[in-house]
Image (spheres, rainbow, N blue to C red):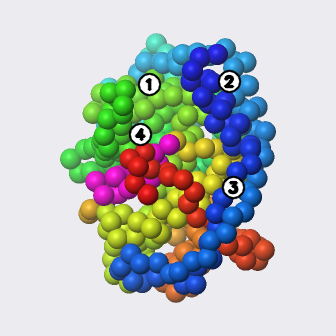
């Protein structure tokens, strides 16, 4: 067992252990103020217990696979599935961008069309499924027969305010696993001049490696193909096994949910950078709450230094980006955290007082959960030592 495997096992065992956490009961929340002051709080010590054997089972399955190195396929002719012209939510933006970044030999089809038996000299090829999450579940239930025969070749996209978090859909349909290719695309944007990288270098690690935030990431069978396609167009793309990719995907979901929500409830239009600069305490508290929830409910420990990375990303890339709530994306960005008390206080206020989420079906936590004091920070989520 190498060092990486040992460290991963330690992290997963930690996710199923007991830990002390501090809780606080606040008397008010400054929803519309622009200062960074917080209300007085009363702190006490509670015992929080997480127990989820899935983390260890996942690691055991990885060891049983015998995989030590990531296998990478070359880029080449591919099929790109664009949203149907009748889709209420989808656009061809991502499909067109993928074709533009290719070598001119891709085929673009719609979800109702059958796949070709081969492309050029390839009998196996990636199938880039660029459907929005609203259309994805229905497609997976009713896909044409030619897709059913090539399930392992489907490439799913997530991340950002357009594609969100689709893990729930993929798990229900049996696609959330190591061999299935998933791509986090929030590290790139389609602009009039073309596709651009919007990730951010946030420093250099002690071993000399560059540290980045907000980059694209890929896992699964065709991770090499998408990596080569993106990097040929100057888009950074991190590659790894599914268990590693999943941390990056959830980190992005936390960023999209927390920073946009905290900024959107303000009286004046607020940018992501302004949220990071003026509402840092509220952001930090929510990051800790959501991180603890993921650790307890999904046996998922986000990578050390998340707070530093997300604050740097918001300040470095969000100066011109207004905080935005996309009502139709509630299930794929905010919905996964409906059991988080403090987070849901913001969601409730956003809907009741700010007119946000007008059509979203919001499942609020039980009263027993809402009556508990919210979790606050223990230790430090930042890798730069700031508290």
Task: Please name the residue that numbered disc 1 is placed on.
Answer: 225
Report how far apart the C-alphas of labels 1 and 4 lie in the structure. 14 Å
Classify residue 103 as left or right of residue 112.
left
- Within-10-Å neighbours for mark 3: few <14, some 14–19, many 20+: few
The span picked out in magenta is 304-318
- Within-10-Å neighbours for mark 2: few <14, some 14–19, many 20+: some
Label 2: which secondary element: helix
Q: Is 307 in the magenta?
A: yes
Label 1: which secondary element: helix
Q: Quadrant of residue 173?
A: top right
Task: Please name the residue that numbered disc 3 is placed on.
Answer: 20
Label 3: which secondary element: strand
Residue at the limit of the structure toward the bottom, as seen here: 353
Q: Earlier in the sequence, mark 3 or mark 2?
A: 3
Classify residue 26 as left or right of residue 263.
right
Q: Nearer the viewer, mark 4 or mark 2?
A: 2
State whether residue 127 appears in this view: no
């Amino acid at each position: 067992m190498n060092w990486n495997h040992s460290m991963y096992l330690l992290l997963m065992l930690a996710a199923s252990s007991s830990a002390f956490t501090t809780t606080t009961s606040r008397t008010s929340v400054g929803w519309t103020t622009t200062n960074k002051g917080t209300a007085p709080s009363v702190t006490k010590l509670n015992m929080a217990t997480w127990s989820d054997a899935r983390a260890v089972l996942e690691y055991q399955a990885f060891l049983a696979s015998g995989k030590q190195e990531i296998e990478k396929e070359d880029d080449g002719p591919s099929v790109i599935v664009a949203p149907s012209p009748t889709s209420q939510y989808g656009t061809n933006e991502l499909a067109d961008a993928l074709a533009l970044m290719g070598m001119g030999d891709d085929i673009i089809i719609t979800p109702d069309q059958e796949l070709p038996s081969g492309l050029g000299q390839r009998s196996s090829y990636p199938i880039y499924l660029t459907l929005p999450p609203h259309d994805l579940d229905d497609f997976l239930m009713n896909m044409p027969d030619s897709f059913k025969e090539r399930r392992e070749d489907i490439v799913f996209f997530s991340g950002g305010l357009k594609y969100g978090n689709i893990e729930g859909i993929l798990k229900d349909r049996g696609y959330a696993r190591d061999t299935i290719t998933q791509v986090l695309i929030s590290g790139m944007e389609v602009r009039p001049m073309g596709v651009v990288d919007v990730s951010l270098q946030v420093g250099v690690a002690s071993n000399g490696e560059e540290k980045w935030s907000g980059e694209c990431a890929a896992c699964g069978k065709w991770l090499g193909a998408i990596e080569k396609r993106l990097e040929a167009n100057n888009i950074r793309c991190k590659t790894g096994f599914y268990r590693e990719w999943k941390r990056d995907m959830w980190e992005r979901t936390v960023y999209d949910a927390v920073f946009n929500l905290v900024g959107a409830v303000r009286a004046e239009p607020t940018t992501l950078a302004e949220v990071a600069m003026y509402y840092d305490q509220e952001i930090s508290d929510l990051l800790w709450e959501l991180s603890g929830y993921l650790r307890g409910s999904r046996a998922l420990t986000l990578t050390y230094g998340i707070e530093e990375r997300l604050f740097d990303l918001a300040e470095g890339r969000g100066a011109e980006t207004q905080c935005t709530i996309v009502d139709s994306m509630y299930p794929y960005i905010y919905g996964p955290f409906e059991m988080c008390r403090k987070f849901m206080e913001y969601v409730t206020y956003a809907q009741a007082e700010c007119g946000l989420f007008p059509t979203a079906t919001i499942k609020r936590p039980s009263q027993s959960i809402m009556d508990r004091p919210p979790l606050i920070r223990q230790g430090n989520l930042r890798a730069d030592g700031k508290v």
